[in-house]
Amino acid sequence: MKIKGVLAVLFLSFFFTVNGQNAINAGSGDDLTSRVVFGGFVRGGLYTWTDSDDKLHVPTAFSDFGIKLETSGGNNFKAFTDLRFRYGSEFGKPVSNLDIREAWVQMNGSKWNVSAGQRIIKWGRGDFTSPINRLSPVNTLMRSPDREDMDMGNLLVSAKVFPWQSVNLEAVYIPYYRPSVLIIDPIPLPAFVTIEQLPPLLTRGNMSTYALKADFHPRFIDFSVSWFDGYNPMPGIALTRFILELEHVIPVIDVGLSVKPYRNQVLGADFETIAGPFGLRGELAWSRPLLSPDQKEYVPFAELDWVLGADWSSGIWRFTGEYSGKRVLDFFPSTAEPILGTQMDLAALAPLLLVPGFDPETYIKQQVGAFNRLYNNQLHEYYHSAGLRIEAELLYGKLLPSVTTLCNFTSRDLLIMPEVRVKPSDGLTLTVGAEIYSGKKGSLYDIVNDFMNGAYVSLRVDF
């Protein structure tokens, strides 16, 4: 980012600090109709791991600065802004950017509200997996001790209506498409393969999305039903260029891939309740792309997903567990190996060219489709996964150890995240932890673990 952008951040910080403090002080008397809350943080940290030569390296180091401003005019309106600035290195590449994570305004009525702007909206009640949550993209490569930093906002308009005390209705309209950041971006590609990324925001053409939800709050249980019709935040990968030259002893091949969005429909339901000392929650979702995966290799199959989770607390301990599963509808086995994550033997391609009726472009397209199925967990008809988080609160909340484990039993992918947070004083947090990815050969976590594995340390001051 240019130096002007840095100066703008510093100016905004100074402006909001002075004026926000004045507004807070002004609202601390008898005037309760307006309120301004200002806060933020400064954070520094790094991720480190060993390379192929068992030497310690630091692929990611960061200096983060964030400010939040919330203001309201009694019950009439509300506005919220979350600005982030990051400077450092991510996966060995320099980073310097200013991100408007959220910036929205909301107008309130007696039984309704309408908001517009950049906003993060998360539906669903799952702790580790949420097949209903399709409204906001995520940056799966975001290196941060706070997992919520992966969430990205969308430009949208939303409206809520509260016709009865135990019922509220919500509608969301997203006019443009903002893609998620795929976890595969740092993967070293074969020399003959290139990937064209999407811009941060697609504004051309009809890329709109809408979603509807009805929440019900009777006694002892909360549940909702929802409908999503629009472009899935997580795009696919399409084959857009294929050149094959046979004039050489070993064929020369040039493959161009592009990240490509697709339209999807999702019907979902979720619930949350209490059973004795346990908190219970679950989700059920049916999703269907509008295009056929038989013709478009970047489009996934329709599927049925289910999630069931529980949490339990006892003294200083808190346990959160979750099971999730899916069935891939209209499933048939893949006829090719994924194009990414495997080493293509070009010499082995030559005999295939002699087979009557063999189409090399179709073969490569099948490989691209196989990778999309690998990424979306659709190489098998059924998938079963589980997550477990164990947390403790020691020394009156000053020492917070935890460990989170996510395991996909079908693909045999495993993620372990141990972490310790130390809060020696108010506003100061020291975090030490690790993200350890593991998987069988050719699985998604096996492909990404070389660059995603990392031990991290960060120091954060909130103000």
Image: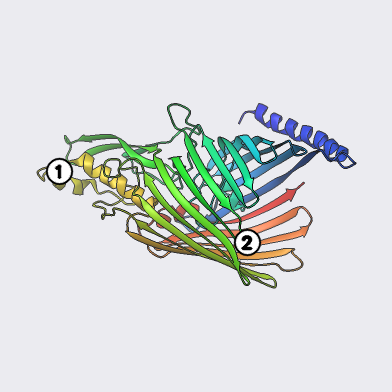
- Tell me the tag on residue 377: none
Does residue 402 appear in the picture of this structure?
yes
In front of the other: 108 or 379 = 108
Q: Earlier in the sequence, mark 2 or mark 1?
A: 2
Q: State the SS at label 2.
A: loop
Closer to the camera, 440 or 31? 31
Q: Which residue is mark 1?
A: 358
Quadrant of the rendered structure where residue 87 is? top right
Neighbours of disc 1 within 10 Å: few (<14), some (14-19), many (20+):
few
Q: Amino acid at mark 1?
A: Phe
Label 2, label 1: how many angstroms apart (C-alpha)?
A: 63 Å
Q: Is residue 310 above or below residue 66?
A: below
In the image: residue 233, left or right of residue 402: left
Q: Which mark is residue 219?
A: 2
Nearer the observer, 374 or 53: 374
Q: Residue at x 71, y 65 (%)?
A: 399
Where residue 154 sits, quadrant-wise, is top right
Pick the quarter of the image with the N terminus.
top right
Q: Is residue 99 visible?
A: no
Q: Position of residue 412 (x, y in %)?
A: 40, 63
At which x and y percent is residue 211?
50, 41
Query: Mark 1 falls on what kind of element?
Result: loop
What kind of residue is marked 2? Arg
> Foreground mark, 2 or 1?
2
Which colour style is shown?
A: rainbow
- Label 2: few (<14), some (14–19) or many (≥20) C-alpha neighbours in 10 Å: few
User: Do callouts 2 and 1 mark residues in contact (Cβ within 8 Å)?
Assistant: no
The residue that appears at 26% across and 43% down in the rendered structure is 364
How far across and how far down the image is residue 72, in percent? 75, 37
